[in-house]
Amino acid sequence: MNQFELLKILEEIHSSALSPAKAAERLKHLPFEDIGFAKVDHHRSLRQGYAEVIFGKGKTPAQVAEIVRAMISKKASSHNVLVTRADTKMFAAVRRASRAAKFHPLSGVISIERSKEISGKGTILVVSAGTSDIPVAEEAVLTARMMGNRVEQLFDVGVAGIHRLLDHRGALTEARVIICVAGMEGALPSVVGGLVGIPVIAVPTSTGYGASFGGVAALLGMLNSCASNVTVVNIDNGFGAACVASCINRL
Amino acid sequence: MNQFELLKILEEIHSSALSPAKAAERLKHLPFEDIGFAKVDHHRSLRQGYAEVIFGKGKTPAQVAEIVRAMISKKASSHNVLVTRADTKMFAAVRRASRAAKFHPLSGVISIERSKEISGKGTILVVSAGTSDIPVAEEAVLTARMMGNRVEQLFDVGVAGIHRLLDHRGALTEARVIICVAGMEGALPSVVGGLVGIPVIAVPTSTGYGASFGGVAALLGMLNSCASNVTVVNIDNGFGAACVASCINRL
Amino acid sequence: MNQFELLKILEEIHSSALSPAKAAERLKHLPFEDIGFAKVDHHRSLRQGYAEVIFGKGKTPAQVAEIVRAMISKKASSHNVLVTRADTKMFAAVRRASRAAKFHPLSGVISIERSKEISGKGTILVVSAGTSDIPVAEEAVLTARMMGNRVEQLFDVGVAGIHRLLDHRGALTEARVIICVAGMEGALPSVVGGLVGIPVIAVPTSTGYGASFGGVAALLGMLNSCASNVTVVNIDNGFGAACVASCINRL
Amino acid sequence: MNQFELLKILEEIHSSALSPAKAAERLKHLPFEDIGFAKVDHHRSLRQGYAEVIFGKGKTPAQVAEIVRAMISKKASSHNVLVTRADTKMFAAVRRASRAAKFHPLSGVISIERSKEISGKGTILVVSAGTSDIPVAEEAVLTARMMGNRVEQLFDVGVAGIHRLLDHRGALTEARVIICVAGMEGALPSVVGGLVGIPVIAVPTSTGYGASFGGVAALLGMLNSCASNVTVVNIDNGFGAACVASCINRL
Amino acid sequence: MNQFELLKILEEIHSSALSPAKAAERLKHLPFEDIGFAKVDHHRSLRQGYAEVIFGKGKTPAQVAEIVRAMISKKASSHNVLVTRADTKMFAAVRRASRAAKFHPLSGVISIERSKEISGKGTILVVSAGTSDIPVAEEAVLTARMMGNRVEQLFDVGVAGIHRLLDHRGALTEARVIICVAGMEGALPSVVGGLVGIPVIAVPTSTGYGASFGGVAALLGMLNSCASNVTVVNIDNGFGAACVASCINRL
Amino acid sequence: MNQFELLKILEEIHSSALSPAKAAERLKHLPFEDIGFAKVDHHRSLRQGYAEVIFGKGKTPAQVAEIVRAMISKKASSHNVLVTRADTKMFAAVRRASRAAKFHPLSGVISIERSKEISGKGTILVVSAGTSDIPVAEEAVLTARMMGNRVEQLFDVGVAGIHRLLDHRGALTEARVIICVAGMEGALPSVVGGLVGIPVIAVPTSTGYGASFGGVAALLGMLNSCASNVTVVNIDNGFGAACVASCINRL
Amino acid sequence: MNQFELLKILEEIHSSALSPAKAAERLKHLPFEDIGFAKVDHHRSLRQGYAEVIFGKGKTPAQVAEIVRAMISKKASSHNVLVTRADTKMFAAVRRASRAAKFHPLSGVISIERSKEISGKGTILVVSAGTSDIPVAEEAVLTARMMGNRVEQLFDVGVAGIHRLLDHRGALTEARVIICVAGMEGALPSVVGGLVGIPVIAVPTSTGYGASFGGVAALLGMLNSCASNVTVVNIDNGFGAACVASCINRL
Amino acid sequence: MNQFELLKILEEIHSSALSPAKAAERLKHLPFEDIGFAKVDHHRSLRQGYAEVIFGKGKTPAQVAEIVRAMISKKASSHNVLVTRADTKMFAAVRRASRAAKFHPLSGVISIERSKEISGKGTILVVSAGTSDIPVAEEAVLTARMMGNRVEQLFDVGVAGIHRLLDHRGALTEARVIICVAGMEGALPSVVGGLVGIPVIAVPTSTGYGASFGGVAALLGMLNSCASNVTVVNIDNGFGAACVASCINRL
């Protein structure tokens, strides 16, 4: 469309319907995206195209349902729809908008799968340390799946029982990207990172008490990882880790 | 120039030397500033035009001198030149570039005054609490002056001797903008803010020891000021406070 | 009045009704405001005169309503009345005091508009980053309006989609003061500050989770802004930002 | 009593009922307080003797009432009884134990006044900054009173309206000890400390939002006070401030 | 003097040399201290009158010596002079100004004793925990002495060898005010506070390493003291503790 | 068993049923524990064998009950069962699984004692400072008991009343390991550590308010303890302290 | 080799030179890598194989040179050698070991290029904000190059002059991975992340002063980035960012 | 001796040289250690008896040498002597006092071995993660040895190369107490703790940069360890860890 607008102006110059000087004036005031940023937008839709995502927290059930309805009404699109940080009330509302909606209570994710197309080249493995890290790990698993990736999961493999992790060397070495979710001391990514040669996205969780300071201990542990293939996202940000992993997996 | 480039393209369409489609393609890849952002640059030079500023810290004396030389060689310009966070070695080098350079050892500022034009509408008053806040206060005074403002200063008026401040009500009420520099508990801006109806820019300093935590105590004090006309800049940022004050004083 | 009191004493000396020594004694014990601070009070009313403001949080609905009633019963005054950090119960109580009261649920502001006089010289533009920053932005918008300013708003222009901001260059350059509200990384004021030559008041919000630490990340980002026309107020302090902006806009 | 025990042992030696060696053995195992620490206890009761204090928080209404009952059943004693951090349920229970109990809802203090004896030599003045500091200030006022002191109060004299404080110079100079309660930037003790030559006990409150960090800003401000007669107690610790003030006032 | 100025104006009215209206105008602009704040100054000199104090850090030896010279040249005064945070170079300079100057290298204090008058009513006892706390303790001892107090000291009585402290119960109970200096865990004031019924001024020191965080651990320990007669001053602030103790000791 | 598996492979080589090369291949893919880590598992069960522990927080009553049921159905085992951070609802569910279950409401511990065997060599003494530290202390007491230790307790012996602690020197010197639980300033372990020559496990609690920062003050105090036989576990971690103490007591 | 060791044991069983039981015993004590972890090592060398890296800081020049000598003496290998956090003294020593060594003073990196083989599939773009971020950016550039990647750099494109960044859209969209280095408010990665659909590795730098807290402000800004393709490494960790980028670029 | 003093008093009563009342008076004022605390001292010497320890930092070489001289001149004692945090100048001075003194430059420890007696029952194993953790590890090794323990060391076994650690299972399982020294993310104690059933003393080191915050990241990691046999000492406190380990090893 913007392309058309631009062309129309240029053609008016060509047909002398518009003087070059006036055209220059008009072009200077055209919104940027019309002439250059379409590319940006294109990139954005390319990147997120495999899932439309709504951050549920702070929205009313009605608002969430309305946005979902708008999304699934676009005929031409068959993107998956994802609502993160949702609750059962939101789910009830979304369910009325789409019978295909599923609720995942642990992670608070609502998913509407409309496409099973796989666009990621390899497997994303989500590894998590303790049972209380599972909600964040599940958010990562579901997000990565809805974005078109093959996803494997390996839960409850904390570093204090290192053999449980070592037993699954196979899964580790077969992945293309690893998401590593851990609370408390956040040591898992360092151990996992040392076992593989692929990128490890570390997600600190707010699991723990006392001096875990809501995930700060895990966050600092991961930022100081002695394994050099580890990068870090925000505390409890399973969604963000999956976005990055998905983005890498499509390279 | 950019205007000319744009016009040239448009004229080529007009003269059919360029097809609209190809022109659209070329326009899409033109650097943004060429068609829209000149305005931005213009604003930048308008804003900083009264002083060219170099942040000395981390640069060698030779580098600083070279930048100064480039600045003062622009014939058409007679902007003042300011080097902040400088030392005597930098000054020696700058002195060779310009005999007009002056060094202010307390604040570590080098100034080259080339214009005495006043562009600020009123007076900027710089108030500071203790003797150890003077370096930061002086940085603010010099910066504001070199940016074309009338500047008054009122030093050593800490809140534990409130009458010293009250004695200078006159100066407070005659200013158009106040910069308030204080370390330790950073209480001065609250008291000053309560006495006047004009904007107060608060600058916390790293003065103090122990639980002043390098200026954090003063910073927090100022952010929580119960006077509603107080805003805050970074610790020890006399330069930044003067920029904002100057920017307000030209409104 | 105080002037009269002072004069009366002095006239009693003149008429020898009072000896100079006794007068000196009495003068030394007169409350300060009687002889000098009226000016201060005058400033305070000048500054806040365009709106009487009540901080609702921590007060009962009955208390809030009573204060509102007292305010609107002053015949001579037609100031706007503003209650910040209010809720629906407070509104119900205030509504009984004044039918003109309006409640703004997003920001929790109750406003009673009694004057439409504009005293600010230019436009205050309130820019905000994400949808969850809107409550704070709305508090700023309403406060600035009730204080007699023309206010424009530009919401949902976060830095990760920079073109949305660039599309509104016009609004940015037409403002006289900008209030910039952002949570998470708090980067918006830096970008906005770089596009304009006017003062930018940055308001960090407690939006975000994990390492946003209730707005600390945004606060630090803003204090360290590389744009030199940015100052900062406390986290979530939309009211304070509007006070400062209004104060600048009347210069 | 302990004195008697000790004497008895010594007399047994004297009467040869006990050999010196065996006595040495027994003395080595006597509880310390029996031979030396009575003095300590004596001091403790001397110090707190003017009020028996119960920290209510974390106790059940029944527990609180039971302790109160035990206290007031000691015939020989007519100490005042104080319950801090109490609520209406505790008060209901305490009321059944003593009809003399009074509840102070702002500060959550229950007081049972049984003695009006004044043991403090001068007046303790409690100064507070904002309306939201009043609960802590009231806790200080009530505690100091129940400990046998004359107490004056001066509320709502924040530093942003410095003349309100200056109007009360008289009260400031007539006190023997000042307790200064303030939240937000915690600047009041510095100003008050500069106006007087007596000890100022500063109490930071958790009043405020955002970067007040639950009273940390005020605490740091007070610790860094530029007035050298200021000392600090814990955040919201009105009780502790009153204990220290009372302790000084009895010197 | 100010009194005289005021009287002169009033007498001019009386003699009709000045009209009441003009006098009112002039009075309104008289510096506050002239009519009311002399009292404040008087208090300040009363409070600090027993020692003139210079904070050496950040001043040049020449500056320090000059201030000392000015102080000791006031004929009418025989106050003691104290320079805190000084070094040997400052001492060399001060020595040339006064042969009576003594340097205390541990604490970095220069003292010039010109009066041996004791104005404090009782004894101030300075207790310190470890050998590395002695510099701060010595600053407190010297400051308290120069301010006219009898001072006793009890060093190296840390809580991990509690009997060393208990051996000196006598000294503890004979003091009128106690200053308690401790680094590391800062537990000493709690133990001392529990043994006595008098005010304990706690001074955290920056002694220690690792998680002592430059005195923060000790500071927090003292603020949370379970002994209710403990107040706290800033980290390493031996001078401030002595000021407060001296101020209490003169009550 | 794993031993058997390994032997079987090796015997197949010996009997030529398996070629060395193929055996090497199979061995390389055997789970680690099968050939080496059994030892680890063995250790784990040895260590925790005296109690099966469930961390209740974050689990549903049904989940907790189910895990308990699984544990007590292992015929061969008669380990004690412990649920920490439990509540009354969990207890109701667990009660239906085992009539032997007991609930300890202060600490939120459910215990099912099935063995009274004592495996620890000496006595573990749990010392705590204030009444609000008792929940954590009780968690430590119950955990240590269920792990097969003789446990003594000594509650309410804070450092501000040091003689209460000194009265119990006997208990201190008879223990083999001491767990020391304290909130607020966390000074108790230093004093206790100085009185004994055995290991002291310090547990900071989140008791306190204001600058106790949820246990950080106590934690820092303990980490900086001047007694060299003190080590520290996480805030409120009574369970962990008991594990370590039990582990030491079995040496 | 390890493979051979394993085979040798198995063959001894086969040839009955070793009984299965004894072999089992020996196998149980074989280092893990011999039977399973060779893969790990293999991965490690695969991953880092394009550069041997020495962390210079804390080593003596002689130690660094010795390690370099050992590395380059391996005939079969022609890996590049990298020394990070080095200084001129280390370089002098390394130079004697290899004439091919080059020193990059800004970043303190010594590089010995022995192979120009490119193993990364696309281009790694290193973007940095201010001139003082260049040392960290250069460390990233050099590390990525020595690890076999095509690397482009785009320096001095801070967010306060957003058009400088927008002018280089081309470079941004042509990269396969972006490393984004920024200090102060750390906003650059959010803006860059919003413009592209590829992974962005954010590196906070310790650039800045006051409330930048040695890079914490930038770190928090990046962790809270509103762009979902951003991950973060430790402050100043240009090396780590390049490792991750290289690791992604080889996928 | 104290025993004798006590006996003398008691015998005087027995011989009627002293009345019981007067004796009681004298006894009440006897220093505590004389009648009860000798035990404490005894404990202290028992505990540290295997090594006399001097904390060198902050003392002059002369002071250190003097203390050493005093220690080794006690004829009856043949304790080992240890100076921690020493430097070459201290060593030169100590060397003149004792030819047997050895200096360990990495850890800055001076040791004078005068006894080779082993009093610890088992082996203390010191495990450390990176090469930069070795100074702290060495301090632990030397301290533990000088206190009469068999000590083994296992250096450079970081978690990112987990097989290096697993290769040494033998050493881990043969130890009686493990000291685990690690900086950066501090994950090693969790992994080690999971592999063994004995107490693990974790020592965070200030190794690392950026978000390691001088050892805070490692400290928090260790406090939040998911292995329940881990306790923690202060950052860089190798000495303290060895004291605790030695104390456990003698049980």
Image (cartoon, coloured by chain):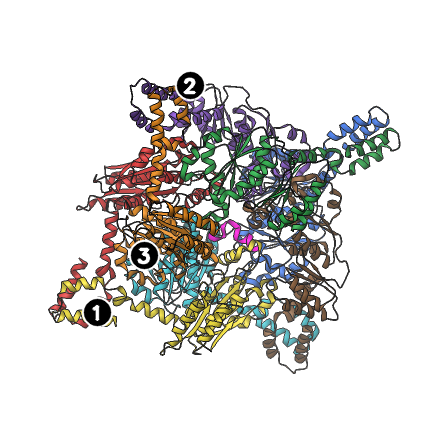
Chain colours: A red, B yellow, C cyan, D blue, E brown, F purple, G orange, H green
In the image, residue C205 sits, relative to residue A237, either above or below, namely below
x and y percentages locating residue A22 in the rendered image: 19, 71
Q: Mark 1, residues whose alpha carbon is within 10 Å: few (<14), some, or many (≥20)?
A: many
Residue type, label 1 = Leu
Span colored in magenta:
D209-222
Q: Identify the mark at residue A249; answer none if there is no mark.
A: none
Q: Quadrant of residue B77?
A: bottom left
Determine crowd level at label 2: few under 14, some 14-19, many 20+ residues with C-alpha closer than 10 A.
Answer: few
> Does B161 appear in magenta?
no
Give how far apart the Cα atoms at labels 3 and 1 are: 29 Å
| Amino acid found under the numbered disc labelled 3 | Val
Residue under numbered circle 1: B6
Residue A233 position in % (x across, y down): 37, 46
E36 over F218 or under it: above or below: below
Q: Is residue C135 visible?
A: no
Residue under numbered circle 2: F74
